[in-house]
C-alpha cells in the first residue's frame, strides 16, 4: 500500500524515522529514532542487510524496504509446512497462539493445510507512538491491522487533492453505528494516531476476551459498529510532518503560504493542498462562515480558515459527507487539537442528550464543556451532523499547547480520551440524564 523512497546516508525525513523504527523492531539498534540517517543508523542497516541476505550497501532501496516492511506492518506471510502448529509458529515469530488464530479464523488448528499461506502477527503493537504519524505511517498501520484482525473492515472512502486514499475502518457488528474522525486539520495529525491506537487497543481486548476501560470488548463488538476515518486531510499532514517537502505540490503550498506570511510554514498549515480548510466545508451556516472568515482576511486559498469556493468543494470533506450519508450514525466525534475542551452544540437542532454526554466526556477526560465561539461556530462537520440529523455530534480539542503537539504529549492525550472513545460506543446511560 505504501510507497517508500530509496534512502541514503545523510538523508533526513519521516521516511528515515520509519526505517529506524523497523530496524529497532527487528533487533538492530539505529540509535535515536530522529529521522536522520547517520552513522549508527547505517551500521544497523548494514547488519540487517547481511542478516537477511541482502547486498550490504547501506542504502534502503526496494529490496531492503521489502525486508523491513513486516517490521512496520506487524505481520509476515508464512507458508505452512508439515509439523507447523499455531503454538510453534507463535514461538518462532514472537507472537501468541491466540494472535495467530485470530489472524487466520478460517483455519482449524488441528488440521493446518500444508502449502497454504497464512498471516503471522509479530510480537509488537502495529501502531507506533514514537514516529511522526504521516500518511505513509497510517497506510502501513491500516495494512497491518487489517491483516492481524480480519474482523476489521478497511475501505477507501475517497481521495485527497493529491489522490491519496482516505482510509476508513470499522470494528463491530452492532446495530448502533458511531463515527469518529481525526486530522481534518493538517497540524493536528496527532489525532489520527489517537484513533488508530485506540482501534488497536480495542482489537487486542476483543481477541483476548478482555475489557477496555472496564467495558467488555466483545459486548462492544456485538452492540456497536464503530467507523473511523483517522486522517481526513493526508496531504496537509504530509506537508506539516515533512513527508511532502519537494515537487510541484510543495511549491504550490509555498506560494499559497506566501500570501499569508503571518502563518508559520509549514507548522501552521491546517488546510488541504488546495488551500481550503476541510472543516469549513460543510453545509451548515457555510455562508455565515464565509462572511466571518472573509472579514478576518481569509479571502483566497490559504494555510488555514479559507472556506473554499463552495460547500463540499474539497474532496476530503465530500468523502466524510458521503460516508456519513451512507450510514445511520447515532453519534459522531471529531477530534482536533488543542485546548482540552468539548464542543457539543449547534443551534436549536442539538438533541437534549448531547449535554449530558458532553458532561460525561468531561468527567472521563478532565476536559471542559464549552460553547463554540461565534466566529468559529459554522460549517464544521459537527455543525452539519447536528443540523442534518438532530443527533449528538461533538468536536473535542484534545491536549494543550501549540500545534502541532509533540509526540511526547501523546501518552497523556491517549489516557485522557480512551474513556470518551469507549463511552461514545456505548452511548448515553439513563443515569446521565
Image (cartoon, rainbow, N blue to C red):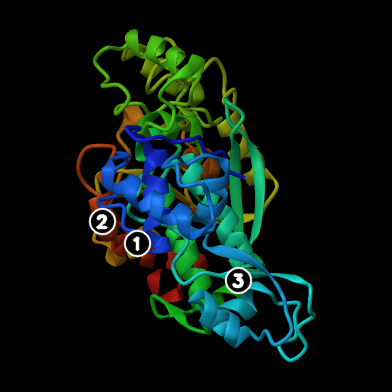
Q: Secondary structure at mark 3?
A: strand
As drawn, the label of residue 120 is 3
Between the residue at mark 3 and the residue at mark 1, the CA separation in whole angstroms equals 37 Å
Assess whether mark 1 and mark 3 are in contact (beta carbons under 8 angstroms): no
Q: Quadrant of residue 412?
A: bottom left
Residue extending furthest toward the bottom: 110
> In the rendered view, does 134 fall on the left or right side of 141?
left
Q: Is residue 286 above or below residue 192?
A: above
Q: What residue is shown at x 53% (from left), y 70% (from top)? A: 203
Q: Between disc 3 and disc 2, whose residue precedes?
A: 3
Q: Secondary structure at mark 2?
A: loop
Q: What residue is shown at x 66% (from left), y 86% (from top)? A: 85
As drawn, the label of residue 361 is 1
Between the residue at mark 1 and the residue at mark 2, the CA separation in whole angstroms equals 8 Å
Q: What residue is shown at x 57% (from left), y 50% (from top)? A: 66
Q: Residues within 10 Å of mark 2 (few under 14, many from 20)?
A: many
Q: Quadrant of residue 215?
A: bottom left
Of 312 and 170, the residue lying toward us: 170
Amino acid at each position: 500500500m505504501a510507497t517508500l523512497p530509496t534512502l541514503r546516508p545523510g538523508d533526513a525525513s519521516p521516511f528515515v524515522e520509519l526505517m529506524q523504527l523497523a530496524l529497532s523492531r527487528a533487533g538492530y539498534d539505529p540509535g535515536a529514532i530522529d529521522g536522520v540517517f547517520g552513522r549508527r543508523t547505517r551500521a544497523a542497516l548494514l547488519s540487517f542487510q547481511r542478516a537477511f541476505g541482502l547486498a550490504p550497501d547501506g542504502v534502503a532501496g526496494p529490496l531492503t524496504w521489502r525486508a523491513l516492511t513486516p517490521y512496520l506492518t506487524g505481520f509476515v506471510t508464512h507458508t505452512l509446512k508439515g509439523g507447523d502448529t499455531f503454538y510453534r509458529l507463535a514461538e518462532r515469530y514472537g507472537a501468541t497462539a491466540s494472535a495467530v488464530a485470530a489472524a487466520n479464523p478460517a483455519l482449524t488448528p488441528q488440521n493446518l493445510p500444508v502449502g497454504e499461506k497464512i498471516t503471522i502477527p509479530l510480537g509488537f503493537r502495529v501502531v507506533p507512538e514514537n514516529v511522526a504519524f504521516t500518511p505513509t505511517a497510517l497506510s502501513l498501520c491500516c495494512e497491518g491491522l487489517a491483516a492481524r484482525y480480519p474482523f476489521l473492515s478497511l475501505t477507501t472512502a475517497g481521495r485527497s487533492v493529491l489522490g491519496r486514499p482516505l482510509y476508513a475502518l470499522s470494528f463491530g457488528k452492532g446495530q448502533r453505528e458511531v463515527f469518529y474522525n481525526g486530522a481534518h486539520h493538517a497540524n493536528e495529525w496527532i489525532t489520527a494516531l489517537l484513533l488508530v491506537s485506540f482501534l488497536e487497543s480495542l482489537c487486542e481486548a476483543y481477541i483476548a476476551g478482555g475489557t477496555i476501560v472496564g467495558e467488555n470488548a466483545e459486548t462492544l463488538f456485538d452492540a456497536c459498529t464503530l467507523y473511523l476515518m483517522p486522517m481526513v486531510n493526508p496531504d496537509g499532514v504530509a506537508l506539516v510532518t515533512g513527508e511532502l517537502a519537494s515537487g510541484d505540490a510543495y511549491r504550490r503550498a509555498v506560494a499559497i503560504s506566501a500570501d499569508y506570511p503571518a502563518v508559520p510554514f509549514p507548522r501552521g498549515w491546517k488546510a488541504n493542498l488546495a488551500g481550503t480548510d476541510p472543516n469549513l466545508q460543510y453545509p451548515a451556516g457555510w455562508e455565515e462562515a464565509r462572511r466571518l472568515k472573509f472579514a478576518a482576511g481569509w479571502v483566497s486559498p490559504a494555510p488555514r480558515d479559507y472556506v473554499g469556493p463552495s460547500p463540499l468543494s474539497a474532496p476530503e470533506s465530500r468523502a466524510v459527507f458521503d460516508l456519513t450519508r451512507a450510514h445511520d450514525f447515532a453519534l459522531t466525534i471529531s477530534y482536533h487539537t488543542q485546548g482540552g475542551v468539548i464542543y457539543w452544540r449547534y443551534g436549536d437542532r442539538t438533541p437534549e442528550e448531547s449535554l449530558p454526554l458532553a458532561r460525561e466526556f468531561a468527567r472521563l477526560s478532565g476536559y471542559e464543556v464549552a460553547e463554540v465561539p461565534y466566529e468559529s461556530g459554522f460549517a464544521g462537520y459537527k455543525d452539519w451532523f447536528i443540523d442534518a440529523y438532530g443527533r449528538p455530534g461533538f468536536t473535542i480539542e484534545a491536549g494543550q499547547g501549540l500545534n502541532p503537539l509533540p509526540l511526547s504529549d501523546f501518552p497523556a492525550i491517549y489516557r485522557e480520551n480512551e474513556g470518551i472513545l469507549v463511552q461514545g460506543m456505548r452511548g448515553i446511560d439513563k443515569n446521565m440524564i
